[in-house]
Image: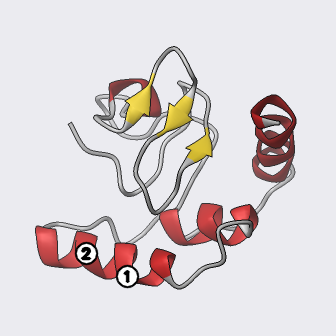
Amino acid sequence: MSAALLRTLEDLLTHGLETRTAPIPEDDRAFEEILVELRQVDAADTQRKLVIAGFVNHPIGDDQQCCMNCMYFLTNRKWCDLPELSLPVKAGWWCRLWRV
C-alpha cells in the first residue's frame, strides 16, 4: 500500500499541489502549532497533510534540506515517522517540519 500511496503523493506534488511552505517554525511553540493542526486531520486525508506540512518534491535552501537529512525520515522504509504525518516520502522531498 505505501508504494501506491507514495506514487499518489508524488503525482500530487508533481502536478502543482499548493502547500504551505511558510512560515517555517522558528521555535518549538510554532512547531507544535502545526502539529496541533495536523492532529485535527483525518489520518486518511494525505493530501491535507501534505498541504499543512508544506511538502515540496525537492530540497530547500542553500544547504539543500530534504527528508533524507531529517530526524523523522526512516531510510529503509522511505517513510516520515513524525506521528502526525506518518506518510511514505522520498528522500529528496522537504517539508516545513524538517528537523535535524
Which amino acid type is marked by label 2? Glu
Q: Nearer the viewer, residue 13 or 41?
A: 41
Above or below 16: residue 60:
above
Give residue 45's position: percent from left, percent from top: 73, 70
Whether label 2 touches label 1, CB < 8 Å? yes
Residue of label 2: 32
* Quadrant of the frame with the C terminus: top left
Q: Is residue 76 left or right of residue 49?
A: left
Residue 36, which numbered label?
A: 1
Instruction: Specify the quadrant of the image occupied by residue 31.
Output: bottom left
Q: In this view, does 8 lie to the left or right of 90?
A: right
Give residue 71's position: percent from left, percent from top: 28, 35
* Quadrant of the frame with the N terminus: top right
> Is residue 22 at least partly visible in the picture?
yes
> Which residue is painted at 16% across and 66% down in the image?
26
> Which residue is painted at 40% across and 50% down in the image?
82
Which amino acid type is marked by label 1? Val
